[in-house]
Amino acid sequence: MAGKLIIFSAPSGSGKSTIINYLMRQGLNLSFSISATSRPPRGTERDGVEYFFLSPEEFKSRIANGEFLEYEEVYKDRFYGTLKSQVEKQLAAGDNVVFDVDVKGGCRIKEMYGDRALSMFIQPPSIEALRQRLEGRGTDSPEVIADRLARAAYELTFAPKFDTVVINDDLEKAEAEALAKLKAFLDK
């Protein structure tokens, strides 16, 4: 039986990765979509495992050929995207494919797959709570935090376009809510 698609988007610091990692451990036949990138591999990253590594020219050629479900040029010649062929291969194998993408990419994938996809937006309780989380990480400069908060305000305007919104004001509650919504979708 062909698999389904589960799309996650959220502002940085919302707890999306933590919730996704929790869901991946729940025995629901979930597998990550393997993205493509035009950046070189880091450390022990392997082609076809963490990412598909493409040259900027090859990435642009594949964009021109319509081979991506979604893509973004994050910096000049630094692309990230989702290859249609890879997703179709995972779906045909019966995998339920999980996407961790930006809001625009999430909306594009949902448009393409309709009812076969569940789009879930993980929302912080407030911008102020998000500021506290980002500052608490201690990994970003005040300028980076300001940029992330400005981007978060923009990304929050996309929440109504998603099938469901999970407000992460209590992690255990948010994980349970996301799991219940995911199970209901997979059981349809």
Image (cartoon, helix red, strand yellow):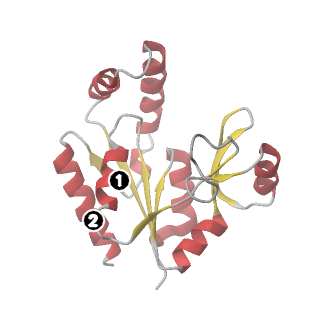
The correct choice, above or below, for 135 with respect to 68 in the image is above
Q: Which mark is residue 20?
A: 1
The correct choice, above or below, for 187 with respect to 181 in the image is below
Among the two numbered marks 2 and 1 on one chain, the one whose residue lies closer to the N terminus:
1
Callout 1 crowding tier (Cα within 10 Å): few <14, some 14–19, many ≥20: some
Task: Say left or right for 168 vs 78.
Answer: left
Q: Position of residue 89 (x, y in %)?
A: 59, 74
Give the farthest residue toward the bottom. 1
Q: Position of residue 154 (x, y in %)?
A: 47, 33
Q: Amino acid at mark 1?
A: Ile
Q: Nearer the viewer, residue 68 or 140?
A: 140
Q: Which mark is residue 26?
A: 2
Q: Amino acid at mark 2?
A: Gln
Q: Position of residue 28 (x, y in %)?
A: 32, 71
Callout 2 crowding tier (Cα within 10 Å): few <14, some 14–19, many ≥20: few
Q: Position of residue 60 (x, y in %)?
A: 79, 48
> Residue placed at 50% from the left, 68% from the top?
114
The correct choice, above or below, for 45 with respect to 136 in the image is below
Task: Say left or right for 128 vs 157.
Answer: left
- Quarter of the image that includes the C terminus: bottom left
Q: Secondary structure at mark 2?
A: loop
Based on the displayed image, in which of its 4 quarters is residue 132 positioned?
A: top left
> Residue placed at 57% from the left, 41% from the top?
43
